[in-house]
Amino acid sequence: MSYIGVINNNWKTDLYPYVGKAFEVAYANRLNKLSPIVGEVTTPNVSYELTGAGGYGEPQEYDGEHLNEGSLKRAFKTTIVPVEYDLAARIGYKEAKIDKMGETRKVGRRLGDGMGLKVYLECLRMFGGAFDAAKTGGDGVCWANAAHPVASSASNHPARTHTPDADAGTYSNLVNDELSVAAITKAQGMASRFVTPDGMPFLCDMDTLLVSPELEAEAKKICGEDAKLYPDQAEHVNPCRDLQYIVIGGGNDGFTAKQWAVCDRTLMKEIVNIIYITKPTVVHNKMDNPLVTQFVSYADFACGWGDARQIIFSTGAGA
């Protein structure tokens, strides 16, 4: 008596839980590094607007009769348009049958690593592009700039065009100092003088140091576990010892060798975001071929910034 073997397509469905779980873990691990300073927003819309704070200015003394009418000073808006990305991998029936768990975990991890790295790289490119005059935000200048407009013109707001309000002036979030304790405290002092679009003090706490991979060793000296004193100056207390640092760089992306920044991590998460229409996910494409199945990693996202007051950049070039 002879028997005819039957290959059931259920083997494809059985793979999915292993691939999906490995994908989620790998993706999350890639983005944990930047999560303290980059927030996430999920939107159903084709675009998303990031904006800084606005207001009506300082309240005036009431004379008992006449109300003080305020004039709304608006921040700039930056429109972020997410982009679709995908990466696919195939698994054959024989591969799955010989080492089902091992193969699926590898596929899930690799797809998750790939999509996690894609989001991570786009964030690094955002920081690295801060000094690029061609990569402008809603205020019309690049993120690291010596002449950011403080406020937009109210008359242009309904049309969603954002002409700078010349009367409000400009501010700089760009220095050229090499990384040092003195340079960090200088930047922190600059930030304490920033104002909001309506002229009120911009309250921030520059508590996080961002450095290139080449500057990580120096960052450890300045704000590492043993940084209670100035580097190489044992008689002086180090005012930056409580800062935390994050390395912004990998491969060819992120900060170049001498670049660094100091920022308010709480405000960064509010103002600097990854905008998702679809967060990274893995999709199972069963395919018509009974001996082959396919898994596709997919995401629809972009990243951007809505204000520049919460971060001060340095080229590190020196005087």
Image (spheres, rainbow, N blue to C red):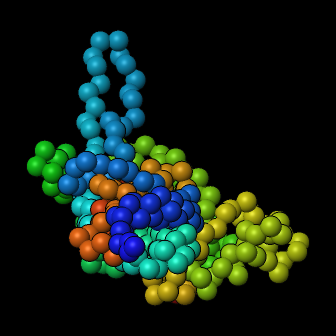
Residue at image coords 75%, 64%:
241
Measured as percent of width and height from the top left, residue 300 is found at 30, 62
Residue 201 seen by the camera: yes
Specify the quadrant that holds the C terminus. Answer: bottom right
**In the image as oriented, which residue stretches furthest toward the top?**
64
At which x and y percent is residue 16? Answer: 43, 61
- The answer to whether 137 appears left or right of 59 in the picture is left
At 47% from the left and 58% from the top, the residue drawn is 17
Is residue 38 visible in the rendered structure shown here? Answer: no
Rendered view: 53 above or below 283: above
Q: Residue furthest right?
A: 235
Residue at left offset 40%, top offset 23%: 61
Vertical side of 128 occupied by 148: above or below:
above
Residue 219 x %, y %: 68, 75
In this rendering, position of residue 235 left or right of residue 132: right
Residue found at x 44% / y 60%: 14
Q: Nearer the viewer, residue 26 or 242?
A: 26
- Is the N terminus in the top left, top right, bottom left or bottom right quadrant? bottom left
The front one of 197 and 77 is 77
**Is residue 48 positioned above or below 101 on the image?**
above
Image quadrant of residue 161? bottom left
Residue 247 location, x and y as percent? Answer: 59, 74
